[in-house]
Amino acid sequence: STFAMHVVRSTEADVVYEDSVDHLSESERTVTGLVFALADGAGGPDTGDVASYLATTTAVMELAPVLTRTHAGRAAAVDVDAPSPDSDGSPFPESLDGDAVCAAIEDAVRTAHRRIVEYVHEASVERSATTVVVGLYDGQQLHYGWVGDSRLYVLNEAASTIRQLSEDHSETRAKVDDGEVDPIAARVHPSTRINRYLGGDKYASDDIEVDT
């Protein structure tokens, strides 16, 4: 059997700003892997755009070496020479397990968060924030993490199914989890407020919780 993975983006027009503050960044595609990040900025058409740009580009740059490492680990397993990224010249491990990749995704998203917070302080802006969803496909498995309500779906054309992988960090989702709002009613719930995001204002913490 064959398997092909394609990354696509879908967004709705902003009801407040004409200019989109969404960003989608991808690593250079390889034969068996890809890193991608999608973000939806908030805080205004300028600062939100900066936040979403920093989130996507930082996450992809941080994770590109991880993707290379997973490939090199497999190359070593079949005695194919591969350069080591380690400064001490140590060989690659045979593989990076899922926990290690998810930890790398968490670190990449936290790095993006800190860079947005730095931007808030350095540019003296009131607020700059964004959601983000990040994925690393290593040729065999998709690893992902997210903050906020930008969603990750898997569309299986052969089975004609679509499945949401991420879970919104929003007040509405929290009410669903607490049994206060019916899951069906949540689809048209008037509240769109999210309770977790990258960046923020000058009082934002340097750390952020990332779900994987």
Image (tube, grey):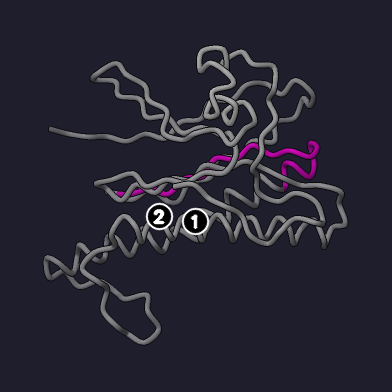
- Asked if the stretch drawn in magenta spans residue 131, the answer is no
Q: Give residue 114's position: percent from left, percent from top.
A: 66, 60
Name the residue type under label 2: Cys
> Residue at horizontal 59%, vertical 61%?
111
**Picture quarter containing residue 206?**
bottom right
> Residue at horizontal 30%, vertical 24%?
156
Label number found at residue 131: none
- Asked if the stretch drawn in magenta spans residue 44, the answer is yes
Q: Secondary structure at mark 1?
A: helix
Name the residue type under label 1: Glu
> Residue at horizontal 24%, vertical 66%?
73
In magenta, the rendered stretch is 33-50
Above or below for 167 versus 81: above
Q: Do the numbered discs 2 and 1 sit on residues whose CB atoms are within 8 Å? A: yes
Name the residue carrying label 1: 106
Query: In which quadrant will I find the N terminus?
Result: top left
Identity of the residue furthest to the front in this view: 179
Label number found at residue 102: 2
Above or below for 101 versus 178: below
